[in-house]
Image (cartoon, helix red, strand yellow):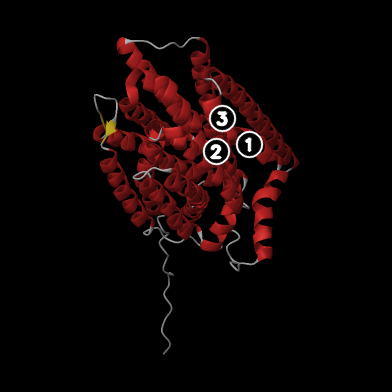
Amino acid sequence: MDDELPLIAPTKTPLNHTRDVHFLSWAFLFIFLAYGAVQNLESTLNTEKNLGTISLGVLYTSFTISTLIASFVVRMLGSKNALILGTIGYWLFIAANLFPTWYTMVPASLYLGFSASIIWVGQGTYLTSTARSHAYDHNEHEGTIIGQFNGEFWGMFASHQLVGNLLSLALLNKGQDGSTSGTTLLFVVFLSSMTVGTILMCFLQKRDPKKEEGLQDSSVTFYSVMVSLSNSVINPLCDRRLLLIIPLIAYSGLQQAFVWAEYTKFIVEPVLGEAGVGGAMAVYGAFDAICSLAAGRLTSGLNSITLIVCGGALTQAIVLLWLLLGYSTSTGLLGIVIPLIIAAIWGIGDGIFNTQLSALIALLFKHDMEGSFAQLKLWQSASTAVVFFVSPYITFEAMLEFMLVAVCISVAGFLVLTLKLERAFSSNTSNN
């Protein structure tokens, strides 16, 4: 007698993809609490012939160029392997700061530019793929899950400024002659932190190649490289939606470089000194993290993204106008509090731009995640490099004016995009 078939087929329990989001978020926290704090200190620690500032300029120039091939590398390796490989450059950069010379810092900066391009394209691809898989397996709204996952990741990521800069504040000591001690211990602690982050990356589950589009054919030929470059660089620029987002992407890079290169140098250091940079950036990171979590939870679609982005742009525009028209260095308690208030407001804006740009690109460019996130990092890193190279040669007031013009142009382009998308949606609805 044949075995009887079961009356009810066993149901497969859907995977809980939030585990991977937790591992990815913690890994980036351990890696970037080290790198972020060191980046904040570059312009004040490695001051001989502007070694620190120029190294960062070289880094972001390399980042910009490497982004042209980053999507191809991520497709070839897979997002998980790209993430692991990308951590090596950050480790070498921190190690180079133990012996800061032109012969160590510049090569390390060049290689970190390449590593940063693949780790960030890999991050965007991996996180979006994870969110879509979770939404599909659990029958949930894709836009909501993308917003929540981005909120968790960017909230955790933003807290690297809080943790890393508190470590800097605790371990660095300023001597009576103005010199800073404790840097070697600080860099050793940071290298250990990065090692932990790399190990956590290894626990990520590999994503389904069929859901990371373009990974099916991993053969490496000259033709495939040229096609990949065309897909990731040229083809996206034919999309009007991306062209309208690029100014906002570029501004997000400008506002990050502004806080690293200008805010610490002209707002914090004159009042709080080098030792106070860590504390001010910790406040920046704390508000960045809180806002990232909140903005991610509030994100559900294009309308929510529009409102949140406009709010973030407005807060930063108000700060820029205040610095340009009414700010002056104060003494006493007020002089200490004002730089911290500016840090908090700027952190809120950064948290908004990070979460909303990632969510927007994930929603609009589902057909090419690697190429779209490569464009995000291309324009962010290019604008960041501009600030580091131009900063030593223009006044602080000129930089503020430039930032004000940039934020106005970026918001205008973004609003035109939202109007076009709303009209297209209304037209499709009426036709149906």
> Reading the chain from its start, which is encountered first: label 1 or label 3?
1
Q: Residues within 10 Å of mark 2 (few under 14, many from 20)?
A: many
Q: Is the C terminus in the top left, top right, bottom left or bottom right quadrant?
A: top right
How far apart, in angstroms, are the residues tagged by discs 2 and 1?
9 Å
Residue 180, label in figure: none
Q: Is the N terminus in the top left, top right, bottom left or bottom right quadrant?
A: bottom left
> Reading the chain from its start, which is encountered first: label 3 or label 2?
2
Q: Amino acid at mark 2?
A: Leu
- Decide which of 41, 144 is in the foreground and name it: 41
Q: Which residue is mark 1?
A: 245
Q: Which residue is mark 2?
A: 357
Q: Amino acid at mark 1?
A: Ile
Q: Decide if residue 78 is in sight here.
A: yes
Element class at badge 2: helix
How far apart, in angstroms, are the residues tagged by discs 3 and 2?
26 Å
Report if the CB atoms under discs 2 and 1 are less than 8 Å apart.
Answer: yes
Q: Nearer the viewer, mark 3 or mark 2?
A: 3
Q: Tell which residue pokes out farthest to the bottom in this image.
A: 1
